[in-house]
Image: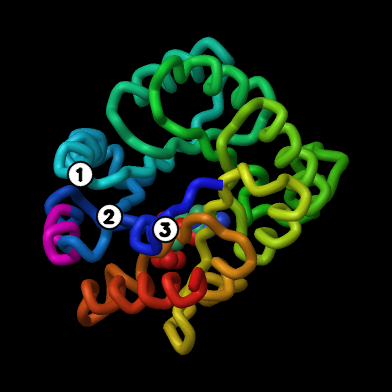
Amino acid sequence: MAKIEARDRLIVALDLPDVKAAEAMVERLGDSVSFYKIGLELVYGGGLPLASRLVKSGKQVFLDLKFHDIPNTVARATAQVADLGCTFLTVHAFPQTMKAARGALGASPLKLLAVTVMTSYDDADLKEAGYALGAADLVGRRAQQAKDAGVHGLILSAEEVASMRASLGPAMLLVTPGIRPAGGDVGDQKRVMTPARAIQAGADHLVIGRPVTQAADPKAAADAIVAEIAGALA
Ligand code: C5P
């Protein structure tokens, strides 16, 4: 597995209302943060040009766009994103979708992360939607299908990291949200893990939003998280 520096393991979620607020946050964080996530809210508010600007300025960008459509559309959309210079793109972990996206990457260094089962779904939601498997079994099945499709990594909750690392091996990138520094405000996240524990469990990258962006001193908060990650790697 390639060595990833502690600072590059922190991905700050730019869950902010508009590009102006996002750019102000990036400016404030300066060299403390090297990797940003742009999701659905911001992407419809100027997030793609912002992604290009961030890439030009030397940052890494995770586009959390969760593609899912017929293979032809997924392939064409992925090819568009592949030219932007971003590092990660999410797709839903349906075999057709993952294979179409993987096949459209060409020589691009863009890596695909599969969303196995949305964490807002429980067994009852899946049954209602017509699925025979419960959430845990479906996560396991789709994780294997992602590996078979040549997808580079998975988005998963911190609690799933250790078992997925054991079953999928060292090459699969495991990226986890739901991280809270010890003693931090949990907010609406129900199952949280500290940065150090998530890294020790085998996570490659941590997606962290509010503990950084809503901190009184965001730069100090990011520095503290990177230091905690570095400590867990030592
Ligand atoms: O502010 P917070 O650290 O909770 O932000 C976590 C980020 O990860 C948000 O962008 C959120 O949408 C995303 N996410 C999550 N849980 C998932 C999938 C994505 O919190 N299961």
Which percent across, then down, holds residue 116? 65, 43
Q: Residue at x 69, y 60 (%)?
A: 160
Disc 2: CA contacts within 10 A as few (<14), some (14-19) or many (>=20) = some
Q: Main secondary structure of the magenta part?
A: helix
Q: Work out whether residue 2 or residue 85 is closer to the camera in this orientation and state it.
A: 2
Q: Which mark is residue 178?
A: none
Residue type at the position of mark 1: Gly
Find disc 2 in the rendering and name its residue: 34
Secondary-structure class at tag 2: loop
Q: Earlier in the sequence, mark 2 or mark 3?
A: 3
User: What whole-number distance in Å separates the C-alpha atoms at marks 2 and 3?
Assistant: 9 Å
- Reading the image, the residue beneath label 1 is 58
- Residues under numbered marks 1 and 2 in contact, where contact means CB atoms less than 8 Å apart: yes
Q: Residue furthest bottom?
A: 183
55 lies above or below 12: above
Residue stretch in magenta = 23-29
The image shows residue 107 at horizontal and vertical percentages of 41, 18
